[in-house]
């Protein structure tokens, strides 16, 4: 939590600094805010640090994570701060069916969905203000992911929410009416996603997730 507070204060400071760009504020035709929709195709992979107890070794002989493919959709806004920077908050629902494969001793293997459905709130700082410059830009930021347990298998037990670190490149596109941005992004959730004490949870010391994908913003 202290890292989130520190990052938020740093982002606020950058935004306040950017708003002092008088030349940009006086530029003719500069829009104050864009809003629209976002769609993406993504992959997700769980990265687990194993530390099985004697109890779990009596039940499972091996556990692995599998690559998941999915999509996300939601709302996207774009707030120009200066001729160089912009802020992009979003609200997104993501479906990425990552799985854990448990090979039971003396029984058939089990596949467990883990964190497949999330509600995400990303906030990205855009560098090079691609909608204004019409050039390739970059972005850094973070997101809060809220676990929605409706699609999730009963075990293992996921945490209610986690923080994610995002980064990538964004390309403005000319597709006719409206403004479009195409993102190539990577996200990493450094916090432990395991939050239970079932036999499925006790195999792991910690589980984190990596996300990559291509996202289109229609603004």
Image (cartoon, grey):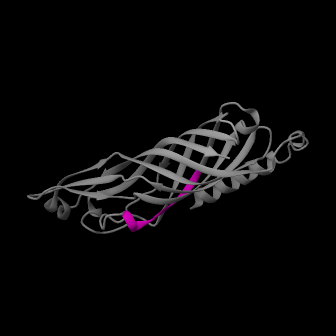
Residue located 11% across and 59% down the image:
107
Residue located 33% across and 57% down the image:
205
* Residue 97 placement, left or right of 166: left
Where is residue 56 drawn, in percent x and y? Answer: 20, 62
* Image position of 37 with respect to 55: above or below: above
Which quadrant of the rendered structure holds the N terminus? bottom right
* Residue 145 placement, left or right of 52: right
Residue located 64% across and 45% down the image:
218
Where is residue 61 drawn, in percent x and y? Answer: 15, 54
Give whichever of 24, 92 is nearer the camera: 92
Q: Is residue 148 magenta?
A: yes
* Residue 193 placement, left or right of 53: right
Where is residue 174 drawn, in percent x and y? Answer: 67, 33
* Residue 70 placement, left or right of 122: left
The residue furthest top is: 135
* Image position of 24 with respect to 121: above or below: above
Name the main secondary structure of what is drawn in magenta: strand
- The residue stretch that appears in magenta: 142-151
């Amino acid at each position: 939590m202290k890292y989130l507070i520190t990052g938020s204060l740093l982002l606020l400071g950058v935004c306040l600094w950017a708003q002092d760009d008088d030349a940009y504020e006086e530029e003719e035709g500069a829009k104050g805010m864009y809003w629209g929709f976002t769609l993406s195709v993504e992959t997700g992979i769980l990265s687990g640090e194993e530390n099985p107890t004697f109890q779990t070794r009596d039940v499972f002989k091996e556990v692995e994570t599998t690559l998941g493919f999915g999509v996300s959709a939601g709302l996207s806004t774009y707030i120009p701060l200066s001729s160089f920077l912009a802020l992009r908050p979003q609200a997104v629902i993501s479906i990425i069916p990552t799985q854990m494969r448990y090979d039971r001793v003396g029984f058939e293997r089990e596949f467990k969905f883990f964190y497949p459905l999330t509600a995400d709130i990303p906030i990205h700082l855009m560098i090079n203000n691609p909608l204004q410059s019409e050039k390739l830009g970059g972005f850094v930021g973070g997101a809060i992911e809220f676990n929605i347990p409706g699609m999730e298998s009963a075990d293992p037990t996921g945490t209610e929410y986690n923080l994610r670190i995002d980064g990538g490149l964004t390309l403005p596109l000319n597709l006719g009416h409206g403004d479009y941005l195409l993102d190539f992004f990577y996200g990493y959730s450094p916090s432990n996603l395991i939050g239970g004490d079932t036999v499925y949870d006790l195999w792991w010391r910690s589980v984190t997730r990596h996300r990559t994908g291509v996202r289109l913003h229609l603004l």
